Image (cartoon, helix red, strand yellow):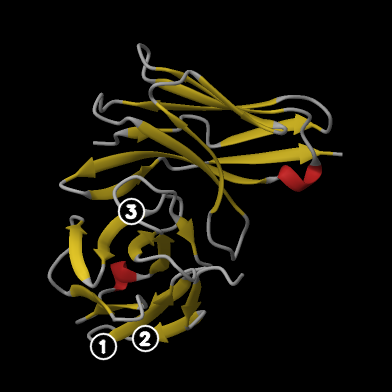
Amino acid sequence: DQQVKQNSPSLSVQEGRISILNCDYTNSMFDYFLWYKKYPAEGPTFLISISSIKDKNEDGRFTVFLNKSAKHLSLHIVPSQPGDSAVYFCAASEQWGGSEKLVFGKGTKLTVNP
Amino acid sequence: DAGVTQSPTHLIKTRGQHVTLRCSPISGHKSVSWYQQVLGQGPQFIFQYYEKEERGRGNFPDRFSARQFPNYSSELNVNALLLGDSALYLCASSQALPTDTQYFGPGTRLTVL
């Protein structure tokens, strides 16, 4: 049973427009969320995170929104650039006994067209 | 500063063989986690180590084992390889536990024939 879901396998946007990537989760115990970007043949690169005590976190062109009641988060990229083309993974932090593991969605492939 | 490094980059094994993957964390990071990513899926948690002790284990068979050394580097061992073990194996490091951003290495691509 997938606890973190990214229902859109792919997304295509024009350069300069907004990219919105969505993520849903089922476990209400998750309290910290992260977005990673992954290029082919590379490991995931940390982008931005958000704690459940916030509903928004912004870092340059990247903003993450969290709606706890809906168990939904989204990543906004404004403006989108061709270099943003990559697979984006949503991850939730699950903690227990002083340990932590990340639970990932399947990813959304973003293509930004020039 | 160097990021997380992993070796080898690629390797090919046959069914039944054993493999050892290596990971060096970011300098100053004391925790190492291992993830398996099969094609079309997100990374799946295998192990977490902190200060040389196993702190967490995912839903993987006992054929998978790991350890962390005094310099905080880590090895992931897989015995009796199966075709289904073919995947990208990712190592991530963080400064501390439990809540600290995990930074990933480039991964080791394992192909089992």
Q: In terms of depth relative to the viewer, which is nearer, A4 or A1?
A: A4
Q: Position of residue A93 (x, y in %)?
A: 33, 40
Query: For residue A61, what is the image quadrant?
Result: top right
Q: In terms of depth relative to the viewer, which is nearer, B96 or A4?
A: B96
Return the chain for callout 3: B
Label at residue A102: none
Local secondary structure at mark 3: strand
For marks 2 and 3, give the one nearer the viewer. Answer: 3
Return the chain for callout 2: B
Farthest left residue in view: B62
Q: Residues within 10 Å of mark 1 (few under 14, many from 20)?
A: few
Residue depicted at x 39% and y 80%: B22
Q: CA distance from mark 2 to mark 1?
A: 7 Å
Residue depicted at x 26% and y 61%: B48
Q: Are marks 2 and 1 in contact (CB under 8 Å)?
A: yes
Name the amino acid, label 2: Lys
Q: Position of residue A106 (x, y in %)?
A: 43, 43
Farthest right residue in view: A114
One can see residue A25 in this view: yes
Q: CA distance from mark 2 to mark 3?
A: 21 Å
Residue depicted at x 37% and y 70%: B86
Q: In terms of depth relative to the viewer, which is nearer, B59 or B91?
A: B91
Q: Position of residue A114 (x, y in %)?
A: 87, 39
Name the amino acid, label 1: Gln
Give the residue pinned by disc 2: B13
For marks 1 and 3, give the one nearer the viewer. Answer: 3
Local secondary structure at mark 1: loop
N-terminal of the pair, mark 2 or mark 3, is 2
Label at residue B44: 3
Return the chain for callout 1: B
Give the residue pinned by disc 1: B17
